[in-house]
Image (tube, rainbow, N blue to C red):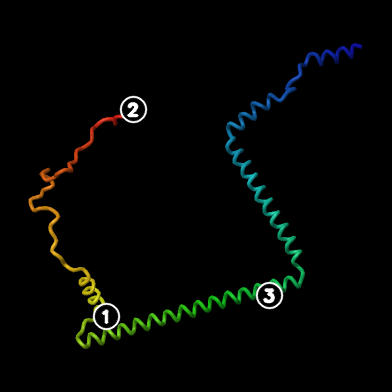
């Protein structure tokens, strides 16, 4: 019995230590106060990495299922033929637009060349080097527009002794500035 009493005495003499996790609280608090921002950035980075990898995995699985489904030889041939036909059609449209553009450019160059020749010949004859036809049309328009408006003798709007700074000659209409201050009202 003494042995039992001795064992009991030892367990009663030694108080239990660290039965709760309060010792972790101070060490975790110190760690987070020193390295808290770094921990947060690492967590955000890991989260974004996981999201990126999930997205890549889902697109890879979708593309593999699509490629497995489209392995039918007839459908592959049909899609290639339709793709080739659409490319050919687009190329023909582009070629037609390019030919039209070249044709338009040639016409413009020919017109410029013809105008330069006309200008050179008019200079040889001693005429103005500007386009004579254009000048003739402008003069005709100017004379016709002036002939449409007949000049009449008009009476002047004011007499010659009128001066806006003098304040005279206002007649019935005289302007006065409004009252200062708040408007009258209810």
Instruction: Give the camera-side residue of 41 and 19.
Output: 41
Q: Nearer the viewer, mark 1 or mark 3?
A: 1
In terms of sequence position, does the residue under pointer 1 or pointer 3 come before the other?
Answer: 3
Q: Which residue is mark 2?
A: 186
Mark 2 or 1: in front is 2
Where's the C terminus, which quadrant? top left
In the image, is 121 to the left or to the right of 113?
Answer: left
Q: Identify the residue shown where x is 70% and y is 54%.
A: 58
Quadrant of the drawing holding the N terminus: top right
Residue at image position (21%, 74%) is: 143
Looking at this view, name the residue that lies furthest to the right.
Answer: 1
**Disc 1 on helix, strand or loop?**
loop
| Residue 60 on image: x %, y % | 70, 57
Q: Nearer the viewer, mark 2 or mark 3?
A: 2
x then y, percent, for residue 128? 21, 81
- Near mark 3 (Cα within 10 A), the count class, few <14, some 14-19 or many ≥20, is few
Q: Residues within 10 Å of mark 2 (few under 14, many from 20)?
A: few
* 91 relative to 70, above or below: below
Distance between mark 1 and mark 3 Cα atoms: 57 Å
Q: Mark 3 highlights which residue? A: 81
Position of 45 compared to 161: left or right? right
Whole-number angstrom distance, CA of label 2 to CA of label 3:
85 Å
**53 over 184 or under it: above or below:** below
**SS at mark 2 in the image:** loop
x and y percentages locating residue 83 in the rendered image:
65, 72
Which quarter of the picture shows residue 176? top left
Crowdedness of circle 1 by 10 Å Cα count: few (<14), some, many (20+)? Answer: some
Whether residue 106 sits left or right of residue 61 in the image: it is left
Secondary structure under the numbered disc 3 in the rendered image? helix
* Residue in the image at 30% along x and 86% along y: 117
* Residue 131 tag number: 1
Decide which of tag 2 and tag 1 comes sooner along the chain. 1
């Amino acid at each position: 019995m003494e042995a039992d009493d001795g064992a009991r005495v030892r367990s009663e003499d030694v108080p239990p230590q660290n039965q709760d996790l309060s010792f972790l609280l101070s060490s975790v608090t110190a760690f987070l106060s020193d390295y808290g921002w770094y921990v947060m950035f690492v967590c955000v980075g890991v989260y974004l990495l996981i999201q990126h990898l999930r997205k890549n995995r889902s697109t890879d699985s979708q593309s593999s299922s699509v490629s497995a489904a489209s392995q039918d030889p007839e459908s592959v041939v049909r899609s290639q033929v339709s793709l080739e036909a659409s490319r050919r059609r687009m190329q023909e449209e582009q070629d037609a637009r390019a030919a039209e553009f070249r044709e338009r450019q040639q016409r413009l160059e020919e017109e410029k060349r013809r105008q330069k020749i006309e200008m050179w010949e008019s200079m040889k004859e001693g005429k103005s080097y500007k386009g004579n036809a254009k000048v003739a049309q402008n003069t005709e328009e100017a004379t016709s527009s002036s002939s449409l408006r007949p000049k009449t003798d008009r009476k002047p709007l004011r007499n010659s002794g009128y001066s806006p700074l003098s304040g005279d000659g206002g007649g019935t209409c005289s302007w006065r500035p409004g009252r200062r201050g708040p408007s009258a009202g209810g």
